């Protein structure tokens, strides 16, 4: 019987062919993921905190988020302390005036802390509020009577609500011990201010929730200076807290406790018995 001629292409299915094919497939399986990741562009959302903008300090790595947080703490004091002084002068109720006093006291202390941290870490600081904060101060400066009370409570509660979540984020993730301590201080200060603002009875929580859910319009940071040139945020000598006639009244108010201690609950307006409408302006 004559031998059958070989079938074209059958050699690949021989033992040697199968081994070579398996090895080739293994090499491809190992190399394709490497090529894929090598060619993939960086995803900003998944970038590690230790990025090119992170620097080494004696207190631990200092990230871009850490530096931004320090700047925001400084900016908060630059407008919230003057807003507190306005409340001490223009507030129509002991609760509003007491909230103003808490803002002045809290940011006087917190600003001293942030300037110390900025000096140790070499972070430049602004000396003026940003544009949005200037607009808020202008609104409070022109408002009078109960309109001032509502604007003050609404604007300040919105601003504190926004920064509160930032403080928590930084405190949870920072690797820098100085920034961590500053976040602890800021957390206690912001929470105290939130409570005394709510205790005024002028916070509109429905409007507040809507504003907090909306994206804040970014505001450019004002010009920054060396931390040694940062002007301290302190009460105005022309408007000392000791001269506030409401200081004694506020301590007797049933809805307000002393400085740094929140009262047991929100007060209601004498007209309606319900919380008043707060300002719904956005921004940070």
Image (cartoon, rainbow, N blue to C red):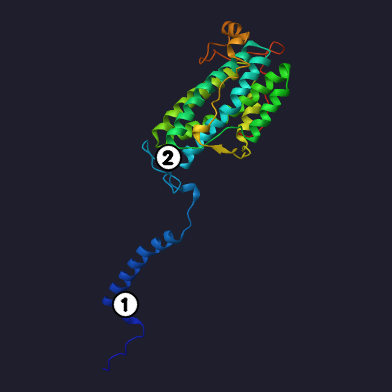
Tag count = 2
Q: Is residue 123 above or below residue 17?
A: above
Point 64% across, 18% down: residue: 87
**Left or right of 200: which side holds 178?**
left
Residue 271 in the image: state x and y as whole percent: 72, 12
> Left or right of 268: which side holds 164?
left
Secondary element type, mark 1: helix
Query: Residue 13's mark?
Result: 1
**C-alpha gap between disc 1 and disc 2:** 60 Å
User: Which residue is found at the position 38% from the left and 42% from the top?
Assistant: 56
Number of residues whose C-alpha sits closer than 10 Å to that of mark 1, classed few (under 14), some (14–19) or many (20 or more): few
Q: Does residue 134 show up?
A: yes
Q: Is residue 198 visible?
A: no
Tell me where residue 193 appears, x and y as whole percent: 55, 21
Q: Residue furthest front?
A: 229
Nearer-the-camera pick, 236 or 281: 236
Tell me the quarter of the picture where residue 215 sits. top right
111 or 4: nearer the viewer: 111
- Which residue carries the number 2 mark? 62
Vertical comparison of 154 with 19: above or below: above
Mark 2: give few (<14), some (14-19) or many (20+) Cα within 10 Å: many
Residue 55, position in %: x, y?
41, 43
Where residue 184 is drawn, which disc sits there?
A: none
Q: Secondary structure at mark 2?
A: loop
Image quadrant for the C terminus?
A: top right
Residue 273 position, x and y percent, is: 68, 12
User: Where is 117 relative to 254, above or below?
Assistant: below
Is residue 96 placed above or below 161 in the rendered structure? above
Q: Are marks 1 and 2 in contact (CB under 8 Å)?
A: no
């Amino acid at each position: 019987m004559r031998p059958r001629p070989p079938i074209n292409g059958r050699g690949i299915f021989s033992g040697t062919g199968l081994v070579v094919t398996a090895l080739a497939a293994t090499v491809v399986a190992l190399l394709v993921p490497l090529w894929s990741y090598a060619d993939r562009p960086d995803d900003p959302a998944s970038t590690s905190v230790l990025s090119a903008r992170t620097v080494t300090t004696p207190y631990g790595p200092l990230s871009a988020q850490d530096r931004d947080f320090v700047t925001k703490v400084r900016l908060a004091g630059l407008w919230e302390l003057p807003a507190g002084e306005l409340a001490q002068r223009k507030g129509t109720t002991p609760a509003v005036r007491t909230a103003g006093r808490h803002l002045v006291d809290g940011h006087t202390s917190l600003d001293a802390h942030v300037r110390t941290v900025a000096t140790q870490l070499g972070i430049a600081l602004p000396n003026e509020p940003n544009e949005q904060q200037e607009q808020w101060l202008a609104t409070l400066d022109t408002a009078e009577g109960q309109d001032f009370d509502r604007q003050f409570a609404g604007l300040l509660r919105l601003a504190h609500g926004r920064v509160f979540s930032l403080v928590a984020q930084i405190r949870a993730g920072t690797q820098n011990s100085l920034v961590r301590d500053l976040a602890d201080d800021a957390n206690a200060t912001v929470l105290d201010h939130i409570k005394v603002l709510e205790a005024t009875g002028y916070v509109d929580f429905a409007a507040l929730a809507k504003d907090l859910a909306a994206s804040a319009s970014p505001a450019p940071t004002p010009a920054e200076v060396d931390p040694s040139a940062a002007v301290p945020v302190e009460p105005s000598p022309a408007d000392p807290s000791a001269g506030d006639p409401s200081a004694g009244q506020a301590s007797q108010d049933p809805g307000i406790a002393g400085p740094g201690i929140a009262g047991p609950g929100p007060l209601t307006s004498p007209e309606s018995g319900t919380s008043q409408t707060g300002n719904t302006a956005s921004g940070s």
